[in-house]
Image (tube, grey):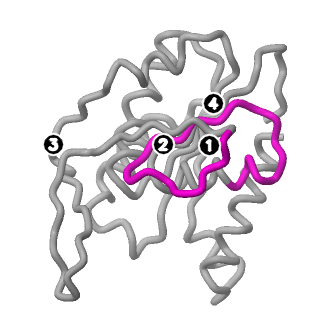
Amino acid sequence: MTQTNNKPLHIIGFGGAGSNISIAVQKMGMPAKYTCISHPERENLASEIEFITFTPPGQNRLTKTGNFYFIPDMNAPLQIPQTLYELFEPNAQYIIIAGLGGYTGTYLMQHFGSWLQEHQKSFTAINVIPFSFERKGFKTIIQKIHTKFKKNENFHFIDLDNYREKFGPEPLIALFDQVNLDIYSLIK
């Protein structure tokens, strides 16, 4: 996706995976405005990256080791704060990066994918489909998003299982590094 207009580039990461990829692209030197939307807040985030906390409905669970982890309620309705709509008010070229393995990335992409089209925004949506073993409660919603948007040229889908097939038993960090490079190349 080469920038074809003179609009400023704004890269927005939806959820944990989308935020992680956006941060990686920023570190590679892609000139753009950056926003990450996830829960919990990222530590040591570059000052050029705006962070918006979006806490999905759910609950904290205590592990046997005494640590808490957050479990989103995938059946809870999406409630979008006005600040997220305001991100799209400027006249910019938007790159939305979302991991479709959690509540935030999945549901924000499902909503804003349609909303951006309806409001005739200039955008590209990059959707990262998680490994098969990660899709347990998300398979139906991932298929719904893929079916809804796959024929639209603004939407790109990157299936992590394809990376596992291509690169074999590489450590996951190496696969994610390749995903980040490929998305950087797609944006560039």
Residue 174 image position (x, y, % from top left) = 70, 77
Report, in whole angstroms, how far the alpha carbon at label 2 lies from the one at label 4. Answer: 16 Å
Image x and y of residue 130, in percent: 47, 63
Q: Closer to the N terminus: mark 1 or mark 3?
A: 3
Closer to the chain start, of discs 2 and 1, is 2
Kindly identify which residue carries mark 1.
Answer: 156
Q: Amino acid at mark 3?
A: Ala
Q: Residue at x 39, y 70 (%)?
A: 134
Dot 3 lies on which element? loop
- Marks 2 & 1, CB-CB < 8 Å contact: no
Q: Which of the two discs, 2 and 4, sits closer to the camera?
A: 2
For the C terminus, the image quarter is top right
The residues bearing labels 3 and 2 have C-alpha atoms spaced at a distance of 18 Å
Callout 2: 10 Å neighbours few (<14), some, many (20+)?
Answer: many
Mark closer to the chain start, 2 or 4: 2
Q: Kindly identify which numbered label has been placed on residue 154.
A: 4
Q: Are marks 4 and 1 in contact (CB under 8 Å)?
A: no
Q: Tag on residue 14?
A: 2
Horizontally, residue 20 falls left or right of residue 79, namely right
